[in-house]
Amino acid sequence: MSITSANSSDVPVIRFENVHKRFGSLVVLNGVDLDIPADQTTVVIGPSGTGKSVLLKHIVGLLRPDSGHVYFHGRRIDNLPEKEFEPIRKRFGFLFQQSALFDSMDVGENIAFPLRQEGGISETQIIETIHEKLSIVGLAASERKMPADLSGGQRKRVALARAMAMNPEVLLYDEPTTGLDPIRADVINELILKLQKQFKVTGIVVTHDMASAFKVADHIVMLLHGKIVFRGTADEIRTCPDPEVQRFIQGRASEAELGALDRL
Amino acid sequence: MEHNQSWPMRAANPIIGSVAAIGAWAIHAVQTMGDFGCFFLSIVYRTFTGLNRRTIRELFIQMYEMGTLSIPVVMLGGGFIGAVLAVEAYPQFKAIGAGNRVGSVIVISVVKQIGPVLTAVMLAGRLGGSMTAELGTMRVTEQIDALRVMAADPVRTLVVPRVLACIIMTPVLTVFSDSIGILGGWLISVGVEGVRNYPFWHYAQTGMDMFTVYVGLIKAFFFGLVISTIACYKGFRCGNGAQGVGRACTESFVAGFCVILLANFILAVMLNNIYVMLWPNQPSIL
């Protein structure tokens, strides 16, 4: 299970350089500069709709920046054609917000999908991998179940097993705990920690669940109005003087946001 | 896009406002056509560059779902249309003393026009809607993004097998629909109206040649292409949420239906011209 390559150098695994992205007249990313260090978990926090998921999708080329550059191990990737992007995508695992399991396939086939797509892997190895990944996420006996028969938390765990199938170097988690009860959410948090510690996976977690952020983060980055407004450790964000940052991590609405209620 | 759509609303002068609205619509139409053109070319490119085992497996699944499972509805529709044709046409033919010739008009109408068009319209409803809904739901629930992240080309994995299955199965289903349509016409003409078997089949046979059959099948091939490419395009470009998927399904059927009728007209003219070129001494068959 060797996952990481040479990553002790100073070159960050992923680097964003002045990335801008807009959809129509809506500006989502407005000059994002960000370095993601290797072998650690970086949590990107920020209110809903600030472009956290958009940021994540730029890393795997699902979205391309309007301007600015994205680098992977020092190599510029944002301008790569779709075909050249494919080998790079194989080095990533992506846990989607809605799990994105293929409805028409059972759990085992879902996990086998990236392996069969890769080709040249024997069926015995594929079956071994399915069992191994399912036991890591604690769903050992669910191989033949259909995604529709699973609970939200189980779907997330199966999706995580699928994201890990190719032993990726970097795992991207898009709101991994959203929609789960606190216990199920904690299971996911523990899994993220386990993957990082055991397999030295570089993790990028996008979330607005602060309990989850504090638990899994080596670094926290806050995205607000399309820009990075804070970067540092969990301890540093607790003492950050910026009122916007404090309001977010403590979950306090502003006067302006509460003002709308007065009109009711 | 948002810019184009929002500013006509703010135009003070109603004339400028309407011109701007027409302009915005035209820009949107040209953009959609261009986008669809690129999508279509990407399907063609991927069809001819490496069909892998997964695509072939998916192709057979789709052929079963689209073809085999559509046979009853297509046959039911075809049968009743043939029967109705006989009910309407026989009295007219009888009035001019040519009741025995009713077979020829039933066969030509069914094989060349009604069979392919009716089958295509039924399939646009049955397959077009479900294809758009399935792909649209996959897009909304990020399954298409998941395919891309796992280095599986979504067009190659999802669209190519559906389009191929549809262009293979639409002509096959048209043959089923035609056959039952002719039988429906025969049942009414011979069983109810009292036309004898021999003249019915004799005139049915003289009324058509192999070219007539080819015309019907060539049309069915293009209708299959139209239904599947539009349905997949609408699914891939559908808006968010249940509303987005629902709207995409409606648009898919309406666009498919309109293009089928347009394509039917263009193909009829083109194939008729080809017939005249090949057999210049024969009367036009349009």
Image (cartoon, grey):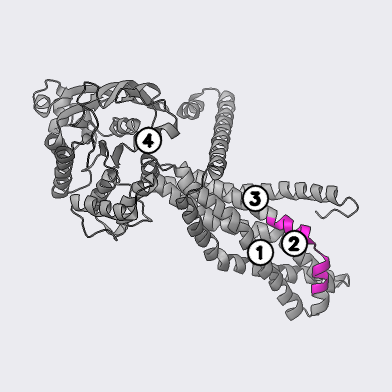
Q: Are marks 2 and 4 on the same chain?
A: no
> Does residue B184 appear anywhere in the picture?
yes
Question: Label 2 is found on which chain of the structure?
Answer: B
Which circle's residue, 1 or 3, is located before the other in the chain?
1
Label 4 neighbour load within 10 Å: few <14, some 14-19, many 20+ = few
- Distance between the alpha carbons at the discs numbered 3 and 2: 18 Å
What is the tally of numbered marks visible in this picture?
Answer: 4
Depth check: give the residue in front, A121 or A56. A121
Question: Label 3 is found on which chain of the structure?
Answer: B
* Residue, disc 1: B175
Residue type at tag 3: Phe
Q: Quadrant of the C terminus of chain A?
A: top left
Residue type at tag 2: Ser
Instruction: Check contact, mark 3 vs mark 2: CB within 8 A.
Output: no
Label 2 neighbour load within 10 Å: few <14, some 14-19, many 20+ = some
- Distance between the alpha carbons at the discs numbered 2 and 4: 54 Å
For label 2, the SS is: helix
Q: Is residue B13 left or right of residue A120?
A: right
Q: Is residue A190 above or below residue A60?
A: below
Queried whether the magenta region covers residue B257, the answer comes back as: no
> Does residue A137 appear anywhere in the picture?
no
* Residue, disc 2: B109
* Residue, disc 3: B222
- Distance between the alpha carbons at the discs numbered 4 and 3: 37 Å
Instruction: Check contact, mark 2 vs mark 1: CB within 8 A.
Output: no
The magenta stretch is: B201-217
Depth check: give the residue in front, A129 or A218. A129
Residue at (80, 62) in percent of width and height: B209
Image quadrant in which you'd find residue A189: top left
Which circle's residue, 2 or 1, is located before the other in the chain?
2
Instruction: Check contact, mark 4 vs mark 3: CB within 8 A.
Output: no
